[in-house]
Image (cartoon, helix red, strand yellow):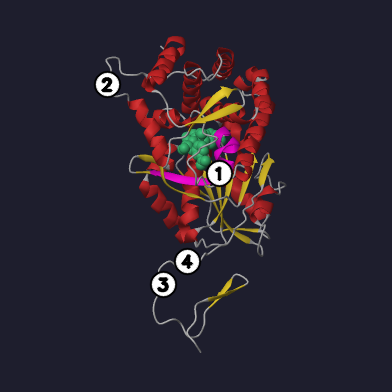
Amino acid sequence: MTPGPLERAHNVITVNRALPPSPPAAGEVYHQQFRVAYEYPVHFTTDVFDPANPCLVSAVCRQGTPPRPLVVVVDAGAARAWPGFQDRITAYVAHHHRHLRLLVPPLTVPGGEAVKADPEATRDLGRRLLAAGADRHTAVAAVGGGAMLDFVGFVAATVHRGLRLVRLPSTVLAQNDSGVGVKTSVNAFGVKNFLGTFTPPYAVINDLGLLATLEERDKRAGMAEAVKVALIRDPAFFAWLEDYREALAAFEPAAMHTLIRRCAELHMEQIAGGGDPFERGSARPLDYGHWAAHRLESSSAYGLRHGEAVAVGMALDTRYAVEAGLLGEAAAARVMALLGGLGFALWHPHLEPPAGGGPWPLLDGLEEFREHLGGELSVILLADIGSPREVHAMDPARLAAAARWLSRHYGP
Ligand SMILES: NC(=O)c1ccc[n+]([C@@H]2O[C@H](COP(=O)([O-])OP(=O)(O)OC[C@H]3O[C@@H](n4cnc5c(N)ncnc54)[C@H](O)[C@@H]3O)[C@@H](O)[C@H]2O)c1
Ligand SMILES: [Zn+2]
């Protein structure tokens, strides 16, 4: 038989018995190709660990033969606010023993940004999953805020190259934004979200009752993401936020629940329909106000919550658009009035340009934002409420004018 090349039939490559004696000629390319479809349910419920509530069972038992192995990890900040919570989880699983099997009693991990910044925490949770005997069929149900979910998600995505993560977000921000999305991360080498993966969760359960014990600042911080997504995607939602501003500022549950549902829907639509769920391009279409926010979070040593920093970042970019002649004063006034009315500060000392000239540390945030995705700088600005515009440069003089304007109106 003549030595022949690889043969392809119906996209399957078969190898001839007699292989060519030398490597293929330069320029020969095999186009490997396959697709993986992702889908995951996002439940909205209350009292997820009431034995009568079937959400967790149906979220975990979607494939395979029950009982499914399960590890539950709880944010220590949340656990402190819920005495007896771990016992409730254990009792829930015992009640559903035909479907669920707890490998170890519920674990706790620290909550907040500190857990993302501690490399030992990653190893420690990995070690505990190893000791529990977690395998690729194990579901890891993580109950906590956005930081803890990013952290547990990263560990779950990398242990055995991927356990099944069921998120039970327990902050407003995590329920309406990060928890329904596809990203996991930890901070490393002083850079936020430096190590991470795009890993869709196995399921998400938004238990609106979990939010009752949140500190007021965490209830408020998550609302910044709703203002953000309304501004760039849904002017009718923005008008609704204006109408319900007082109820939201008072954290009335019915208004909060509507805000969370609509905000989560808009984030899910972007992931499924935006054409770039794993952010391979340079655009960050939902990250309005985020370049300055990331900088303010790190320069304040995470003294600002993510949502609080996003509110300041949106105020800055809104005023910048006015300075640049892109956005009208009246629309900008509506943005400031809504953010201020929800109780957000619209100024931070780290916004200030240096009094005597010289380098302005805030501007490093633009370069850091570009570096994270690589390629061209891409920042979202507003031409109107609901009308985003992508720009690829920001003018430092106009930014300084915007920062000074915020300082005059909302500063000390
Ligand atoms: N993955 C993504 O797509 C994405 C998107 C946006 C933000 N994030 C990340 O999310 C993080 C911010 O998350 P966050 O705003 O939810 O804050 P957080 O996770 O820092 O939580 C704030 C505090 O609330 C506590 N807590 C959580 N739930 C509680 C409850 N029900 N009752 C009482 N206390 C509770 C936590 O222990 C913590 O101390 C940041 O690290 C940010 O980078 C990720
Ligand atoms: Zn955000």
Rendered residue at 60%/33% (across/down): 211
Residue 309 lies in the magenta-colored region: no
Instruction: Give the spatial CA distance, label 3 vs label 2.
Output: 57 Å
Report whether residue 215 is seen: no
Instruction: Give the spatial CA distance, label 1 vs label 4.
Output: 46 Å
Secondary structure under badge 3?
loop
The residue segment tinted magenta is: 172-187
Residue identified by numbered label 3: 25
Select label 2 or label 4 by which is in front. 4
Q: Is residue 39 or residue 249 the one in the foreground? A: 39
Label 1 or label 4, whichever comes before in sequence order: 4
In the image, what residue type sits under mark 4?
Answer: Val
Residue identified by numbered label 1: 143
Instruction: Give the spatial CA distance, label 2 vs label 4.
Output: 52 Å
Rendered residue at 59%/31% (across/down): 229
Q: Position of residue 69 (x, y in %)?
A: 58, 60
Secondary structure under badge 2?
loop
Q: Position of residue 335 (x, y in %)?
A: 57, 19
Q: Is residue 242 or residue 272 the one in the foreground? A: 272
Report whether residue 144 is seen: yes
Q: Which mark is residue 358?
A: 2
